């Protein structure tokens, strides 16, 4: 296994079934674009990790985290290790990445019928040129992350097409729709 984005979609779906057949100790947490805009992507990841741990209710797990993160204090874990490009190096992180990607892709396909015209079922939420053009012609939907949309500007010097997003402290009252994955041992 390796980084889920490097595995063809059909193979990812087969691997998802295989992973789920091997364990019942997994969780995928979705975090809303609104939450991410309000608190930033890193805070959303930390929130998702803690929420996933609560769902699993494992006694003092050790975490392998994909990326270069310094986690906030989490009292009910025995420790963690952040691993840059961990989804390409650590099979358990790869498995978590596959579960998260398959879940997100399914969510994006379902979202396509609720927000037609953005080609979510094709682009799976990634910033393709076709997606950028759809945003410029149709405007943004409630499913778009305002904090990411400025990346769609053709020229970094042109003024932002999107409002600035105010940051504040996290709460648990937000809707869920962005995935995060961790591996727990």
Image (spheres, helix red, strand yellow):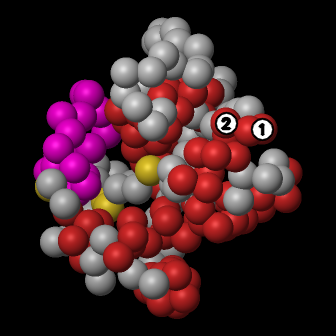
Instruction: Give above or below for 104 relative to 20.
Output: above
Residue 143 coordinates in the image, percent (x, y): 69, 39
Quarter occupied by the C terminus: bottom left
Could you tell me how far apart the alpha carbons at marks 2 and 1 are, in whole angstroms?
A: 6 Å
Kind of element beneath mark 1 = helix
Residue 35 visible in image? no
Q: Residues within 10 Å of mark 1 (few under 14, many from 20)?
A: few
Judged from the image, the secondary structure of the residue bearing numbered disc 2 is: helix
Judge left or right: residue 114 versus residue 69: right
Residue 66, magenta (yes or no) = yes
Q: Position of residue 70 (x, y in %)?
A: 18, 34
Q: Position of residue 59 (x, y in %)?
A: 34, 52
In which quadrant is the N terminus drawn?
bottom left
17 vs 168, nearest the viewer: 168
Instruction: Report the side of 102 relative to 40 (left or right).
Output: right
Instruction: Give the magenta part as a residue range.
Output: 63-82
**Image: 72 above or below 89:** above
Judge whether residue 161 is colored magenta: no
Q: Position of residue 21 (x, y in %)?
A: 51, 87
Tag 2 residue? 136
Can residue 173 be seen here?
yes
Residue nearest the observer in this picture, 99 or 26: 99
Horizontal placement of 29 versus 75: left or right?
right
Count up the numbered dots: 2
Q: Which mark is residue 138?
A: 1
Location of residue 81 with respect to 105 vertically, above or below: above
C-beta proximity under 8 Å, tags 2 and 1: yes
The residue lying at 42 percent from left, 26 percent from top is 40
């Amino acid at each position: 296994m390796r980084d889920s984005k490097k595995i063809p979609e059909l193979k990812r779906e087969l691997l998802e079934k295989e992973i789920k057949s091997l364990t019942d100790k997994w969780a995928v947490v979705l975090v809303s674009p609104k939450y991410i805009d309000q608190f930033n992507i890193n805070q959303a990841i930390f929130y998702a990790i803690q929420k996933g741990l609560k769902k699993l209710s494992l006694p003092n797990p050790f975490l392998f985290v994909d990326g270069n993160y310094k986690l906030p204090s989490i009292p009910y874990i025995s420790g963690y290790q952040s691993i840059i490009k961990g989804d390409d190096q650590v099979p358990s992180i790869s498995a978590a990445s596959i579960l998260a990607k398959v879940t997100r892709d399914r969510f994006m396909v379902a979202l396509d019928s609720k927000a037609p015209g953005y080609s979510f079922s094709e682009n799976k939420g990634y910033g393709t040129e076709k997606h950028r053009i759809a945003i410029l012609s149709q405007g943004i939907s409630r499913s778009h992350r305002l904090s990411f949309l400025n990346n769609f500007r053709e020229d970094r010097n042109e003024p932002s097409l999107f409002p600035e997003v105010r940051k504040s402290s996290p709460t648990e009252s937000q809707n869920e729709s962005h995935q995060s994955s961790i591996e727990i041992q």
